Each structure stands twice: as C-alpha cells, then as structure tokens.
Image (spheres, grey):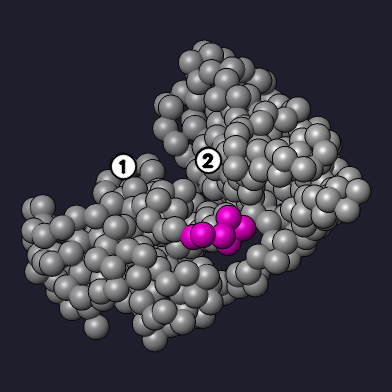
Amino acid sequence: MKQLIIIASCISLFFLPGCGTAPIVPYQPPSASASERAAQESGVEVALDPFVERAREEKYFDIDAVANGIAILHVRVANKTGDQTFFVKKQNFQLLRNGAGDLTSDGKSTDQSSVAGQVMGVLGAGAVMGLFGSSLVSHAVEVKRNFTSKEMGDQTLSPGDSMDGFIYFGPIAQGKDWTRAAAVKINVIDTKTQKVIALNISLSQ
Amino acid sequence: MKSMPLITRSIFAALVLAVTSGCSTTMSPVPVVQAHVTGGQVLPHRAVLVLSQELADYKHEFHLVGGTEVYPIGAALQDYASNVTASAFQQIDIVSSEEKAASLTADDLILIPRAVKSDTSFGHGQYAITIVVEWTAKNRASQNTVWLKTITANATEEMGSAFTIFKHRRLLFQKAFDELNPQTYKAFEEAREFRGGQP
C-alpha cells in the first residue's frame, strides 16, 4: 500500500500545472528605434531593427539567439503611395554577408547584378527549433510557439498601409556579430504591374 | 523491484512508458462552435471559397512530455472559413479546388484559405496556442492575386487537473477559433481591394 501511494504521487506530479519558464513578453515596436536602419524606394519604405543584444533577445524570445546561431530581425514595411498595392513575402528577404555590393547612402544598390558573399534565406519559425536545443520540453515548445506568434506573415500592402513582424535567418556563426558587413536585400512586388522594387539595406552601424 | 506486488510494478511500468515512449496519439476531431461575426458591411462580391483537401486534412500536433498528441482540426478550419466568408461577402460558392473555382464564371473573386502552422505550449498552469492561417484572394478572370493576409490567432487556457485536461484542451481550441473568426472578418472588411464591384 505504501509503495502504491508513492507511485501514485509520482504519477500525479505529471498532471499538476507545470512550472515552465516565465511567460515571454509580447513585442511592441517603438515609433522609431535607435538601432533601426531604413530605406525607401518607389514609395516602399522598409525599416529593419536587428536583435543583437542578448538582453533584448532573452526578453522577447527567451533565448540567446545569437549564441544559438539564429539571427532575429524586426521588419517594418510601409506603403507610401496613393494608388499602388505591394506584395510583401518573407521569401523575398535575403541576408547578404561579407560583401553586399556597393550601397548608396540611402540604401539603393548601385550594383544590380548578383552580389558576392554569403546569401542567406529566411528561416521559418518551425525550422528555428532545429538550431536550438533545450533540455526542458515546456521551455522548448514555448520558445517555438513564441517564434511562430511573432513571425511576420506574408501579405499585400494597400496604399497608406503598413505592417511589421519578425523574420529569422540561420544558421549564423554562433556568438558573432551577424550584422557586421551584412545587408538585407528585399524585393517587393507591385500586384498590378508585377514590377519588382528592390532595396538593399546595410546592417552595419 | 521483485518484492513489489504485481499491481505496483504494472503502474510503475505504465509510468515509465508514458514518459519515455515518445509515441504519437491521434485524438478525436476537435468540436468547435464558430463565432457569429457581424457589424461590417456586406462586401459586394460573388466569391468562390476553395476548401482544399489539404485544409480538410490539417492536424495540430501537441508536443508533450513523453509523446505527441495529434488533433484533427481540418473540419473546424473548413467551418471557420465558410462561416467568416458567408458573413463578409454577398454570395459564396464552395468548391474543393482552384481549378473548379476558375470555371465558375458568375463569380468574380476566388478566396483560398491555407493553414500555415500551429503551435501549442504549456507552463505556469496554462496552455497557449497559436494558429496561423493565410488568406489569398484572386481575381477569378485573370487569376491575379489581389489581396493576401496572414491571420495569427493566439489563445490561452488553464491546464486543469488530470480529470479535466481534455476539457481544457478543447476550450483552448475553441478560444483560438474565437480569435480567428473576428480577426479574419475584420481583415476582409478593412481590405480596400474588396470595396467596389471589381477586385
């Protein structure tokens, strides 16, 4: 009987509310962040805010992303035109490392050909967990769900509208400053004419 | 171990299996009552809603200690799509593929919902869920995409006890759809592309 009580107590521990980690904070973007890099082309304005500080990563994602080889980028896109609609897709954002062609001071690339260096596509929120390991199941699933919840969704942007969200790149060199000598290449498509509007934004300070 | 009575050893074995088996269990389809959404103007379009087999087959995976529970929510997703579009648009026809949608010449708009992903987590006595659905609207005649929006619905629910766990998980899904319906309806109502007769 004593053994039965001990076993039943052990089983009941799995059904009690878990401890887990503290709930992860939702992100409210400031109107203008000091770490933002922005550019505008043909009525499309893009502002990028790379998350490189461990404190910010842990506050909003509950992991040291850079130490785990994950680059987190907050993106804001605004349609400044009065009559055009643009298609904004995550797959049209590329992280260019170690050389990204010549850039003018307003972010326009003077080199329209393919750039040198490493080109990295966006990592889906689900794939992020392949780079991150946690010994605690509840922590790992909460981190993954948070990545999903904060991920920028594809959408069309009507005149005057804006959108924001996070996109993720990886694997990057663990523990290194991934913004150094890096730029983000963005293609946005006019839904009526299918014309591609290209922007290159340097992440180096 | 040998001195333990048989029943105690059986319970111990079940406990070990529950923790270490890593098995996947498919649960019953989740029953969801779709929220009635109103308040906006009826959008002046005859639209055809594509409820694909991919949407119907969508399953949510709930990763827990010791294994994965699989919840079929395809039927709930189809009901949500039917519910929100019927409330938002003047006329809705429902088909199972884009090819069939393109052939309905009386309709001017094709609406395609796609379940992108869903995740659940647990901790601090709560479950949390995120469901992401992408909506594409195409001009039926030209097949051009005129509008696309990703809807992300989040919800939480208390975990309950060993005897009420499944009831709270069903409530979790209900709450997620209670978020999905009004968010999607609002997205339709705010889309400039749907105002006026032609998309």
Point out residue B113 in the picture as x, y percentages from the top left corner: 58, 34
Point out residue B141 in the picture as x, y percentages from the top left corner: 46, 23
Point out residue B128 in the picture as x, y percentages from the top left corner: 69, 55
Is residue A166 rendered to the left or right of residue B91? left
Q: Which disc, if any, is residue B191?
A: none
Q: Secondary structure at mark 2?
A: strand
A204 and B9: which one is in front? B9
Are both tags, 1 and 2, on one chain?
no
Q: Which residue is mark 1?
A: A194
Q: Disc 2 is attached to a residue of which chain?
A: B
Q: How many labels sit on residues?
A: 2
What amino acid does circle 1 point to?
A: Gln
Using the image, determine if residue B50 lies above or below residue A83.
Answer: above
Residue found 46% across the figure and 48% down from its top: A126
Q: Is residue A136 magenta?
A: yes
Is residue A123 rendered to the left or right of residue A118? right
Q: Which quadrant of the figure contains the C terminus of chain A? A: bottom left
What amino acid does circle 2 point to?
A: Val
Q: Disc 1 is attached to a residue of which chain?
A: A
Q: CA distance from mark 1 to mark 2?
A: 24 Å
Using the image, determine if residue B148 lies above or below residue A65.
Answer: above
Q: Which residue is mark 2?
A: B116
Residue B15 appearing in the image: no
> Which residue lies most toward the bottom here?
A34
Point out residue A67 in the picture as x, y percentages from the top left corner: 35, 70
Highlighted magenta segment, given as a residue range: A134-139
How crowded pointer 1 is (Cα within 10 Å; few <14, some 14-19, many 20+) is rated as few
Q: Is residue A39 magenta?
A: no
B46 and B31: which one is in front? B31
Using the image, determine if residue B17 lies above or below residue A199.
Answer: above
